[in-house]
Image: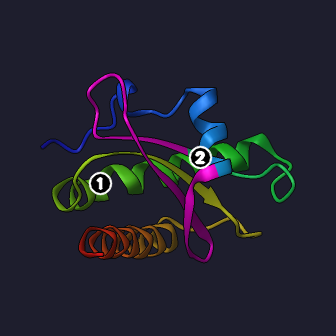
């Protein structure tokens, strides 16, 4: 599997995003929060992913966009672990909760922790 993040893997469906906030389960490794929901994705993709940064914490669109780019890049490089260790299809939404502009290393460490916790949660659900 290549380390790409194609358009069909991006979460854009408003109904699915709303459903994520209402019914999704959350995992946090501050400053990153992952909200996930098991779904039936229509276009044959295993995981659809979105990223968001609150305007409340970062007024500047430039800062918000930079954080979103860092989140997407870190996810792109680490998504193979999720694809290889989970079954079924999911919708992911990554939220950045911090108040300071992060470094890539900081984002990468916490996003990796969140994905590891997600894999453990899925394994626990499978065995229960």
Judged left or right of residue 55, residue 84 is: left
Q: Position of residue 112 (x, y in %)?
A: 38, 71
The structure residue drawn at horizontal position 82% and vertical position 46%, both measured from the top left corner, is 60
Above or below residue 29? Residue 115 is above
Q: Position of residue 94 (x, y in %)?
A: 55, 55
Is residue 42 visible to the viewer in this orientation of the structure? yes
Under tag 1, what secondary structure?
helix
Between marks 2 and 1, how big is the CA–CA gap? 19 Å
Q: Which residues are magenta?
A: 23-50
Under tag 2, what secondary structure?
helix
Is residue 52 visible to the viewer in this orientation of the structure? no
Is the stretch drawn in magenta largely helix, strand or loop? strand
* Res 48 → quadrant: top left
Using a 10 Å C-alpha cutoff, classify the residue at mark 1 as few (fewer than 14 neighbours), some (14 to 19) or many (20 or more): some
Judged left or right of residue 63, residue 5 is: left
Using a 10 Å C-alpha cutoff, classify the residue at mark 2 as few (fewer than 14 neighbours), some (14 to 19) or many (20 or more): many
- Image disc number at residue 42: none
Q: Which residue is mark 1?
A: 79
Q: Which residue is mark 2?
A: 20
């Amino acid at each position: 599997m290549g380390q790409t993040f194609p358009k069909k893997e991006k979460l854009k469906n408003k109904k699915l995003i709303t459903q994520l906030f209402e019914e999704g389960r959350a995992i946090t490794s501050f400053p990153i929060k992952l909200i996930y929901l098991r779904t039936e994705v229509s276009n044959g993709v295993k995981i659809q992913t979105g990223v968001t940064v609150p305007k409340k914490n970062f007024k500047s669109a430039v800062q918000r966009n930079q954080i979103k780019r860092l989140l997407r890049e870190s996810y792109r490089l680490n998504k193979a672990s999720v694809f290889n260790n989970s079954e079924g299809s999911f919708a992911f939404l990554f939220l950045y909760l911090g108040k300071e502009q992060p470094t890539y290393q900081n984002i990468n460490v916490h996003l990796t922790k969140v994905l590891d916790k997600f894999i453990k949660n899925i394994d626990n659900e499978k065995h229960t």
